[in-house]
Amino acid sequence: MLKQALGNAWNKGVYGHIGEKLRSCFYVPAIGIHNGQVHSAPRSFFGVEDFLDDNNSRPYTYKKEKKSKNPQKHISFKQRTEAYMEPFTLDVLISKRFVTASLTHRVTSRQVAVAGTNSKDIKAVLRSRSDIPACLAVGSILAERAREADVYTASYTPRDRDKFEGKIRAVVQSLIDNGIDVKIYLD
């Protein structure tokens, strides 16, 4: 009924006298009545039409960057420049069966040199793929590949569960002996 009344008013018009001229005094939006359907946006896949979080992003999407709990927190000069001053990091992974080491560029996250006991060229030569001589071989081959890529310095921070001894120390010491300067950060 309201739709009919508004439709009649729109078609015929409601005018008021202001002096000698007729002026329209009733305005109806041009899009009309929505018939119980949402006009602002189509239905989403999840059935959530009008949900927007505080950043006006779509629901059920994950952000790649972490949002700081305190956006006004001061970031020190060392934290801002460390990735550029020491751009290459050493990553050593030792499992029960294999030893793998790689040099990664911090800024671009690109692996510059990789060596592991699971590769074909090392696999045939070694008697065991996870003992100390295998770690020394991985370190020397990684140093050779790093020099080919013009990388002569790297930094190494062991993971929380790793101790800097035994096989990990053998890989790092082999890198140092073969001409790669490795800065070790122990917390």
Image (cartoon, helix red, strand yellow):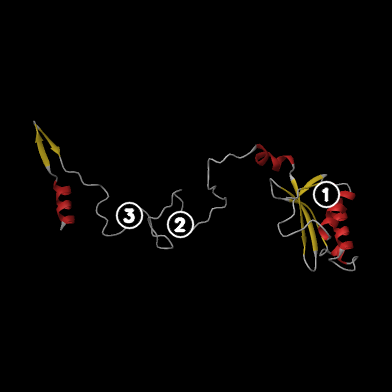
Q: Is residue 151 visible?
A: no
Residue 173, relative to residue 24: is it above or below? below
Please, what is the three-letter code of the amino acid marked with disc 3?
His
Q: Which residue is mark 3?
A: 39
Residue pushed farthest top? Answer: 19
> x, y percentage for residue 111?
74, 52
Q: Which residue is mark 2?
A: 59
- Helix, strand or loop status at disc 1: helix
Q: Nearer the viewer, mark 1 or mark 3?
A: 1
At 83% across and 63% down in the image, what residue appears?
117
In this view, the residue in front, 76 or 54, is 76
Left or right: where does residue 129 sit relative to residue 33? Answer: right
Q: Residues within 10 Å of mark 1 (few under 14, many from 20)?
A: many
Residue 20, relative to residue 67: is it above or below? above
At 42% across and 60% down in the image, what residue appears?
44
* C-alpha span from label 3 to label 2: 19 Å
In this view, the residue in front, 47 or 4, is 47
At 61% across and 40% down in the image, what residue appears?
75
At 77% across and 65% down in the image, what residue appears?
95
> x, y percentage for residue 55?
46, 48
> x, y percentage for residue 171?
84, 56
Residue pushed farthest front? Answer: 187
Q: Are marks 1 and 2 in contact (CB under 8 Å)?
A: no
Q: Earlier in the sequence, mark 1 or mark 2?
A: 2
Q: Which mark is residue 146?
A: 1
Q: Earlier in the sequence, mark 1 or mark 3?
A: 3
- Helix, strand or loop status at disc 3: loop
Please, what is the three-letter code of the amino acid marked with disc 2?
Pro
